[in-house]
Amino acid sequence: NAKNGRDVSLLVKKGGVQMFKVTWSTEKVNNANEFKFILHDKLEVNPESILFKNIISQYKFLTPFNTRSGEFEFYVSKADKNVVLNKFYAKGKVMKDGNKALELLMTTNEQPYKFELFAPALLGNVKPGMTEAKISVAHNPGQSLEMKTNFQKFTGFKIYKTGSGNERKVEVNGKELVMGDYTLTDNSFSTKLTVGADYLEPKITWEGKLPQNKAEAEAFMLKNNIVVKVTGSKRNLDLSLNWKMTKPDFNFGTPENGKISLNAKGHNPRWGDYSLSRDATWKVENKVIEVHWTGLAQFAQGRLATATPIETAFNFKILLDKADLIGKFMKKVNGKEYSLDFPEGSGVMPKIVMGQ
């Protein structure tokens, strides 16, 4: 058509009487600055038609109709962005027998961003009597983020700078939830979070500077040592995680190897005093994957509490050409072993140990 779209019409009659009629009309704009698509549609249904009797009149969640018309519009600005994504909006309206049945607006093309949905037939099933949902988001990069809703139990939240360094406050439903400050350097991140009289102070350090390009990111991910130290009014944690590996090429025929080690100990209200360690090594060569994974864990209280440390040992090989798994997967809890031992040979049943 003249608006760079298409016009479609479908008419079905029975015995010279119209059973239903469907019409579509679209418009499109696509240039260097914007993309816009508009759809107009209309459906007229005879109440004596099979379509009405067998489908439309049987709606459980939606309202039946004889005439339904709709308009839908989608727009993307190719020139303007909001932080990361291009500005856009989507909006639409559905009328049934002259009454508004649905209306939608979702936009980042204005401030605040909005999501608004009027749909009594749908929302009434979520909450009796609910006809519309409204959400707005106001974002001031680096300063504040605020969401408002018309929901009864969740009216929104707000995160904003207090003006004291990097300190920020978080409010939920108009009440202060948490306050925190942070410090970021080339090789560390530290913060302090306060909730009433309780506090938490985590600090994370790593080797080298934060990656600034692809090559630095690759080096960072192939080898590093991360240390996490957390102190607080009710919990603490000391954790170290280090790894080293060759660059994976996902070609299981070429040699690759790596190792990773995790050690953690701490205290919290759920587990009491606890400790956890994991060590893993792997290598890939000639389409054989070999993995060794060992560890210990102990928790003073809770469902995971045991008299002795929980032992973990997974030692196995995968022969890709033969589709064969060889190895043993073992957990030992309070001195009792639970394991699966796969012998050599594809399809051979494993040996199972349960609590011996």
Image (cartoon, grey):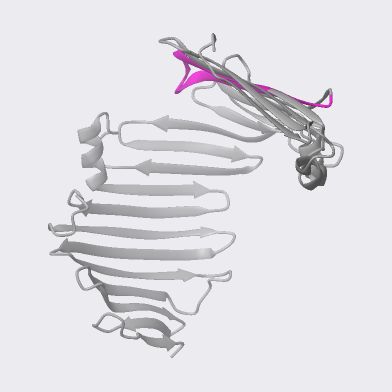
Placement of 173 over or under 312, stated as above or below: above
Q: Residue at x 32, y 53 (%)?
A: 241
Q: Is residue 350 magenta?
A: no
Residue 171: x %, y % from top left:
66, 31
Using the rendered image of the protein, determine whether residue 306 is visible from the camera's viewpoint.
yes
Viewer-proximal residue among 8 and 194:
8
Q: Residue furthest right?
A: 129
- Dividing the picture into quadrants, the one containing residue 206 is top left
Q: Residue at x 53, y 44 (%)?
A: 200
Using the rendered image of the protein, determine whether residue 141 is visible from the camera's viewpoint.
no
Total labels: the figure holds: 0
* Stretch of the chain drawn in magenta: 71-97
Residue 289: x %, y % from top left:
21, 66
Residue 222: x %, y % from top left:
22, 47
Viewer-proximal residue among 76 and 41:
41
Placement of 308 over or under 111, stated as above or below: below
Placement of 275 over or under 172, stated as above or below: below
